[in-house]
Amino acid sequence: MNQRGKGASGGAAFFVTGTDTEVGKTFVSVRLLHALRRAGETVLAMKPVAAGCEETPEGWRNEDVEALRNAASFPVAREAMNPYLFLPPVSPHLAAAEAGVMIEMDVLRRHLETLQGQAEQVLVEGAGGWLSPLSDSTTMADLAAALELPVLLVVGLRLGCLNHALLTFEAIRGSGLPFLGWVANCVDPAMSGLDENLAYLTRKLGPPLAVVPHGASVSEFDLGPFLGLLGEGQNGTR
């Protein structure tokens, strides 16, 4: 890639990570894809590695992969957007080891570049959190670095989120990759001190690009402020 987030063929990309598993990365990613499409962008999604499938007559199906694929501007082959798919719902490094597969960064880079040749924006969603392992020696952070992508952080607002958010934020900054910002996703509607937690994170991470209410639909929140940051982050200016 000739600059961060920008493919040689012209298409751009960014990486979505989270503070943990089950914090709403796919939920937010789907809404981002819709927002980009409403803004007139041609968008595709990539889920480099997914673990946990339902066996169907048509083959293995992963819920996150299907949601991302259906939210894109047009369908692409599942294998193109999701090169590594594993049946058991476990950490990708365990699923890959069980399958006797090595997750290769060069393979993922080629898949991303192919998608960038077909769309103006490609959203790449990680699995688990920022340091979720892909092997004994590589993590999701290494994947984002290998792809040279700016990073959007989804913070799941629930007990423990402050520690998780600050650790992840510092790790992203330490990687040298551009930080696009963060989205607050209210995964626990009964969380005590929600407003106080949001205020604390705003002081530490900056204002969130969006605060997603629990159970929100696509029409109930606006991720428009994110769109203007894409060009900045993908040129490494943020």
Image (cartoon, helix red, strand yellow):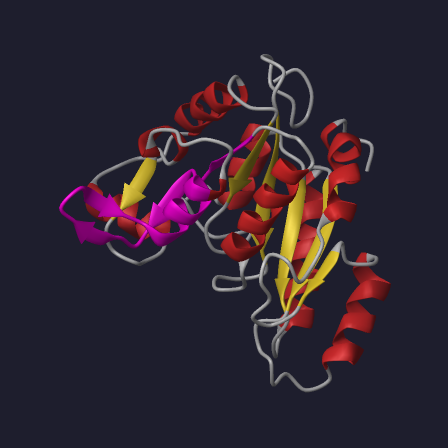
Q: Is residue 154 visible?
A: yes
Q: Quadrant of residue 162?
A: bottom right
Residue 75, percent across and down?
A: 40, 32
- In the visual, does 185 lie left or right of 111? right
Image quarter of the C terminus: top right
Height in image: 161 above or below 183? below
Say whether residue 111 is magenta.
Answer: no
Residue at image location 82% in from the left, 64% down from the top: 202
Q: Position of residue 159 (x, y in %)?
A: 61, 79
Q: Quadrant of residue 170?
A: bottom right
Residue depicted at x 43% and y 24%: 111
User: Going by the image, does 106 lie left or right of 213?
Assistant: left
Q: Residue at x 41, y 51 (%)?
A: 64
Q: Quadrant of the N terminus?
A: top right
57 or 24, nearer to the observer: 57
Give the extent of the magenta segment: 43-70
